[in-house]
Image (tube, helix red, strand yellow):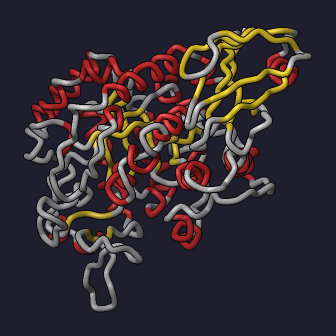
Amino acid sequence: MKTNVLLLSFVVACLFFGCEYGRNDAVDDFASMPARESEPWVRDAVIYEIYLRSFSPEGTFAGLEQRLPELRDLGVSVLWLMPIHPVGQENKKGTLGSPYSIQDYFDVNSEFGTMEDFRRLLNAVHEHGMKLIIDLVANHTAWDNPLIEEQKNWYVQNDRGEIVHPAGTDWWDVADLNYDNPEVWEYMKEVMRFWVEDIGIDGFRCDVSELVPIEFWEEAREMLDAIKPVMMISEGTLPAHHIYAFDITYSWNLYHALPGIVHSEDPATAIDDLLLNEANRYPRGSLRMRFKSNHDENAWDAPAVEKWGPEGTKAVGTLVTTLPGVPLLYNGDEVGNPKRLELFERVPIEWEEGDEYRSFYTELFSLYNESSAFRKGEFVKITTTEDNSIYSFIRWYDNDIKLVLINLKADDIMFEARGGALLDAVGMQSGTLSKKFGHGDDVVHFTSDDTISLSLPAYGYAIYDVR
């Protein structure tokens, strides 16, 4: 089964993530289709993004390997390594060059170690019960990639026959591959096969995937599925990516909606609009990656603890972990790292402080990993008397029922919820809320006739068992 190639004009319009704003009640054709069925370990993942230059004092595969027990204990299950390949030096940006300027797809950056070091890291990741995926930069190469000289016709060229960088971008440090040439498809599929079959990685996060034809991704996924189950993440928002090629797309819509809620006058109910848009646009069961930061946003916007504030980052972290989707944590956020991790330099993460954040994420991810409600449960919005500030919902699967309450504003809030609404959502006559995480009363008993009075501090959060 294959989907059609989407128009490039639509891709370019959506590339900078402007296609999911505002409320849209129209239902797209994709919404009536099922998303591809992902492996349980993919659907249940807690993804941890690693920038090797910044992650350890050594900045190497070995430096990461030493800290795998720490990541396992944090509760992450999939490690995503930003590009590990040799970096182009011609036309490079900054002192070290961009990791997304690929000089050789079949080798590793000597900054990080040898291929044998990488194999040892991969084996250790698997021994610790985790998976490892790497960045795939399929849209462009470095200017000193040998393909420039050996296969000039694999690249986009201008009227003068000169290879060009990707149009409409400032990515002048890379050369644009031409997917009108079927030889490019075969080469890049061989790159993917090599890393999955010969080396043994568990999948790819695919950089600017919307600039590569969807039919290429579909052919590549068919090839990979014949080798072993993998995770495929699209750095994009196209609903069509969920049908066959990809497991997960980026939830840029949530990331870009949250500043107006957390720091301005937008109501928390704006989240309802974006979830409705997703339901109306995306295939049923589509997995969206929820995040409060990543390498781009840390470097070009702000570190999470700066963007959301010391307490706001916990409220947003709770939200992106408990909403339907797959949560992502960027390295350093678990200690409240205040530094911008520049992509063309080496900026070490400040690991010395931030025990409160590490404890927060360890507890939150433990609850997530233990709860089938969060990993695969239904979502039901719960209305309160302060919906401009409080975002409240139930996640439930069989007998596992969780109530999530998050104050997305900078003021202490007292609010009420109708007991009947809570109980109707899960088919119960009376209930007890038992706090598992966060702020608020430890135990609340109620019936369908009760009005439940609750309170949360500024940027407070609470997760309750409902029984």
Q: Residue 401 appears in which quarter of the rendering?
A: top right
User: Which residue is pictured at 56% across the width and 31% down the height?
Assistant: 460
Compared with 65, 90 (above or below) is below
Q: Is residue 209 visible?
A: yes
Q: Residue 446 appears in which quarter of the rendering?
A: top right
* Percent position of residue 16, x then y: 49, 65
Q: Quadrant of the N terminus?
A: top right
* Percent position of residue 146, x then y: 14, 64
Answer with left or right where residue 29 lies relative to residue 125.
right
* Percent position of residue 217, x then y: 46, 51
Q: Nearer the viewer, residue 45 or 166?
A: 45
* Percent position of residue 192, x then y: 32, 44
Q: Quadrant of the C terminus?
A: top right
User: Which residue is pictured at 56% across the width and 70% down the height?
Assistant: 13
Q: Is residue 275 visible?
A: no
User: Which residue is pictured at 32% across the width and 70% down the height?
Assistant: 176
